[in-house]
Amino acid sequence: AHISLHTMPGYSAPESLRLVGHIALQPVVILVDGGSTHNFIQEHLVRQLVLSPRPTAPLCVLSLCGANLVLGVQWLESLGPLC
């Protein structure tokens, strides 16, 4: 798994898009990032929204900062072809 530098505050690139959205009326900063291979969410947001994540193999990455949620290539591919 790869998370790009675009998740750092103040860093921007053409392949990333930072948005403010809402999940269950909770404001969140969403980074749509073509430089990240997977999707990531801050642990505190998982607890706050009472989400039930699926167990996966342990993945050690740096804590997210600058975004509450990163939607990477994994999510982008789920959209299908974009014309």
Image (spheres, rainbow, N blue to C red):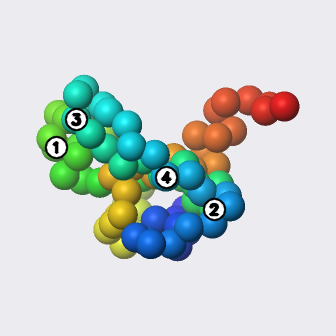
| Residue 35 marker | 2
Residue located beneath label 3 in the image: 26
Query: What kind of residue is marked 1?
Result: Arg
Q: Amino acid at mark 3?
A: Gln
Instruction: Report the mark closest to the observer, 3 or 1.
Output: 3
Disc 4 or 1, which lies upstream in sequence? 4
The amino acid pointed to by label 4 is Arg
Residue 76 image-quadrant placement: top right
Q: Which residue is mark 4?
A: 18
Q: Give the total number of marks visible in the rendering.
A: 4
- Mark 3 and mark 2: span between their CA atoms? 26 Å
Q: Nearer the viewer, mark 3 or mark 2?
A: 3
The first of marks 3 and 1 along the sequence is: 3
Q: Earlier in the sequence, mark 4 or mark 2?
A: 4
Residue 14 in the image: state x and y as whole percent: 68, 61
Give yes or no for contact between labels 4 and 3 (Cβ–Cβ under 8 Å). Answer: no
Check the picture and name the quadrant holding the N terminus. bottom right
Look at the image and tell me in which quarter the C terminus lies: top right
- Element assignment for label 2: loop
Give x and y (percent) for residue 6.
53, 67
Q: Which residue is mark 1?
A: 47
Q: Residue 31 location, x and y as percent? A: 48, 52
Circle 4 sits in a helix, a strand or a loop, which is it?
strand
Callout 1 secondary element: helix
Q: Amino acid at mark 2?
A: Gly
Which of the 4 image quadrants contains residue 63? bottom left
Work out how far the residue at label 3 is from the one at label 1, CA to CA, in angstroms: 12 Å
* Mark 1 neighbour density, 10 Å: few (under 14) some (14–19) many (20 or more): few
Q: Residues within 10 Å of mark 4 (few under 14, many from 20)?
A: some
Disc 2 residue crowd, few under 14, some 14–19, many 20+, Cα 10 Å: some
Residue sitting at 41 percent across and 63 percent down?
Answer: 59
- Are discs 2 and 1 less than 8 Å apart at CB? no
